[in-house]
Image (cartoon, grey):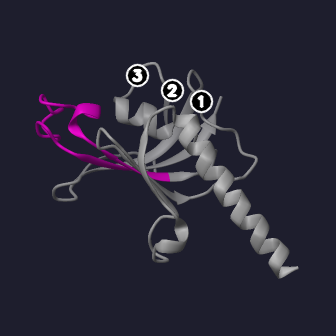
Amino acid sequence: KKKKKKKTQESEGLASKEQTVSASGQKVVSTVPAEKQEKDKPSQVRTYGNGLVIEELAMGKPNGKRASKGSQVSVRYIGKLQKNGKIFDSNVGGRPFKFRLGVGQVIPGWDVGVEGMRVGDKRRLTIPPKMGYGEKGAGGQIPPNAWLVFDVELINVN
């Protein structure tokens, strides 16, 4: 029974890796298998050629609704500057943030990073300046050319 369970888990792991690569539609530079990482690290890390890094922190319901382009999504998040870890925005403890995915209502790093998440999934998005706020920065909180780190949890998909 244990052998059968282990084989099933391994094949499911492969299927999910292949699925995430094709679902994003962008070229993935590297995918780090879970076996080669320590227990406190995320189970899967994808690094894109433009610098965007998507780390899977926790998996939600296997049959949960998946976020896709055009869908209305609700998320909880914490936004930090990569340079010093300073939190510049968070809605944890407040209302979930709602937006339509893939239509430019949020920074490009979010449109790419949230796509494919299932309800309950948690991801860490490390977003390069070109996919964030770029040379202008934002609202005095985010300096020009800042790398951003967002911990995002998908709450709902409509």
Location of mark 2 (residue) = 101
Distance from disc 3 to disc 1, alpha carbons, whole Å, reads 14 Å
User: Badge 3: few (under 14), some or many (20 or more) residues near its Cα, within 10 Å?
Assistant: few
Please tell me whether residue 49 is drawn above or below residue 17 in the rendered image.
above
Residue 17 image point, x, y percent: 59, 51
In terms of depth relative to the viewer, which is nearer, 144 or 95? 144
Magenta segment boundaries in residue numbering = 123-150
Q: CA distance from mark 3 to mark 2?
A: 7 Å
Q: Residue at x 56, y 25 (%)?
A: 69
Q: Are marks 2 and 1 in contact (CB under 8 Å)?
A: yes
The number of numbered discs placed on residues in the rendered structure image is 3
Is disc 1 placed on a helix, strand or loop? loop
Is the residue 69 above or below the residue 3 in the image?
Answer: above
Q: Amino acid at mark 3?
A: Gln
What numbered label is drawn on residue 105? 3
Q: In the image, is residue 56 above or below residue 35? A: above
Who comes first in sequence, dot 2 or dot 1?
A: 1
From the image, which quarter does the N terminus lie in?
bottom right
- 64 or 9, which lies in front? 9
Which residue shows up at 49% across the image and 39% down it? 114
Quadrant of res 118: top right
Q: Do tag 3 and tag 2 residues touch (Cβ < 8 Å)? A: no
Q: Residue furthest bottom?
A: 2
